Image: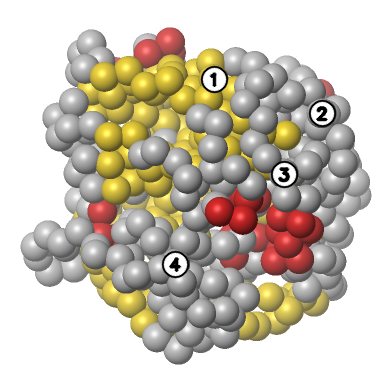
Amino acid sequence: MGLAGAGLLAACSSTGGGAATRAPVSAAPTPSLGKPSVEATLRVGVDQVDLGGVTASTWLYDGVLPGKELRAKSGDVLAIRVENALPVDTSVHWHGIRLHNAADGVPGLTQDPIAAGDSFSYTFRAPDPGTYFFHPHSGVQIDRGLYAPLIIEDPAEPGGYDAEWVLVLDDWTDGVGKSPDDILAEFKAQNGTVSTGMNHDMGGMGGMGSSPLGDVGDIRYPYYLINGRIPKSPRTLTAKPGQKARIRIINAAADTLFRVALGGHVMTVTHTDGFPVQQAETRALYLAQGERVDVLVTLGDGVFPLVASAEGKGGQGLALVRTGSGAAPSATVRPAELDADPLLLTALMPADAARLPDQQPDQVEQVTLNGQMQPYAWGMNGTVFGADTPIRTTNGARVRLQMTNMTMMAHPMHIHGHTWSLPQNGGLRKDTVLVLPMQTVTADLQADNPGKWAYHCHNIYHAEIGMMTSLQY
């Protein structure tokens, strides 16, 4: 099937101002959650942002980049009113939160889009502490400036650190290069058909294969950002020598996998995708689109570069950690730690408290990831979203998904409304899992949150072209 029939992420909305084409969605009922602990209004609008000497016209939450952090405690009820001042439809997805289906923010699946000039209120409980974020689920809007951290604190956590920093990584083209909509239109114009076999043709636009992980992206961006700044004008994080910092890192990029390191330091990984792990020390780590990681670092004395290198692309984001005197490193600094063997987060082991109870799967589903760069086409199980067959199960079942990547591209696969347990890693809990070329990842989930749940690649261009299906029960 060609791409013209694909239902895609913005299934009943338009990112370019056209009319909606699908019937209204019958959303699942909103449960009674009680009085909200956190209330906020989120304004989505067209604005200009200073990236650090480079001004871009883009779309922002509340006029800032990243959007303002939302913070709550585990178990809190959040009530967020979204006011859409864009010229097009939008939505908000609360990435990684195990919320009820009606608040998941996927037009065409869980809600109607938020029309231009309209508003919508999301009310949900955040059951699990951790590092999360939010972004649209409408077209390629995440490749503009629409993303922000969502931090759910654990009241029982002992702490034990002196500083806490939240860093959001991004790839940037909007207002300084091609628009995301134009990039997507060029991909769509290739009118590719999903290849169901092994496909080595990764040429054409992008074709980036200079990584141990295989091909890791399609687009070379003008800039890579950390907390909304280009490397020539980086954010500075300040502390004192010997202090311990907790760094929460979110990859909100549309197409870029980052290799992350802090010059002169070893990082101790404590959490991934919100859930605690058996602590692991590393000098560098990979962070795929949609993944989050928490690390602890005991800080040295001086000025140190925290670098997010765009894997396979030859660019980087930069922030500075300053604990003492010294000159700032250059925008192109490459700390030796980046050339250490980076940690894949799927290689971690879970903390005991994060494991699901042992249970054999009641249902096993084979999922193949298909496609190629030229002509551009991506899908799952040999088809594209809109022509796909949803995965169906029953409430209470333990479902095993065996994801086999039949392409030469690494795909960060994301499940909504649930957290996977990876049996090959002792039950490691993650909601976004990087599946490397020609490899299979086994992921179990407990079907304890009924609804229609998106399941897709978190490279937004792959998802928009059709690498998405749904889990329904």
Quarter assignment of residue 179:
bottom right
Query: Looking at the image, which residue is at 42% across and 31% down?
Result: 430
Residue type at mark 2: give it.
Asp
Q: 405 left or right of 304?
A: left
Task: Find residue 201 and name its label.
Answer: 2
Residue 177 lies, with reference to residue 187, above or below; the image says below
Judging depth in this view, the residue of 335 and 458 nearest the camera is: 458
Which residue is under mark 4? 12
The number of numbered badges drawn on the structure is 4
Is residue 445 or residue 265 the one in the foreground? 445
Residue 115 rendering spot, x and y as whole percentages: 44, 81
Disc 3 versus disc 2: distance between alpha carbons? 12 Å
Q: Is residue 224 above or below residue 357?
A: below
Among the two numbered marks 4 and 3 on one chain, the one whose residue lies closer to the N terminus: 4
Q: Which corner quadrant of the image does residue 78 belong to?
A: bottom left
Q: In the figure, is residue 414 to the left or right of 324?
A: left
Say which amino acid is labelled 4.
Cys
Mark in front: 4 vs 3: 3
Lower sequence index among marks 3 and 1: 3
Quarter occupied by the C terminus:
top left
Nearer the camera: disc 1 or disc 4: 4
| Residue drawn at point x = 12 percent, y = 69 percent | 35
Q: Amino acid at mark 3?
A: Gly
Mark closer to the observer (2, 1): 2
Which residue shows up at 80% across the image and 39% down it? 374
Say left or right for 386 vs 452. right
Secondary structure beneath dot 3 equals loop
| Mark 4: secondary structure | loop
Residue ID at (64%, 47%)? 2
> In the image, what residue type sits under mark 1?
Thr
Q: Identify residue for label 1.
A: 404
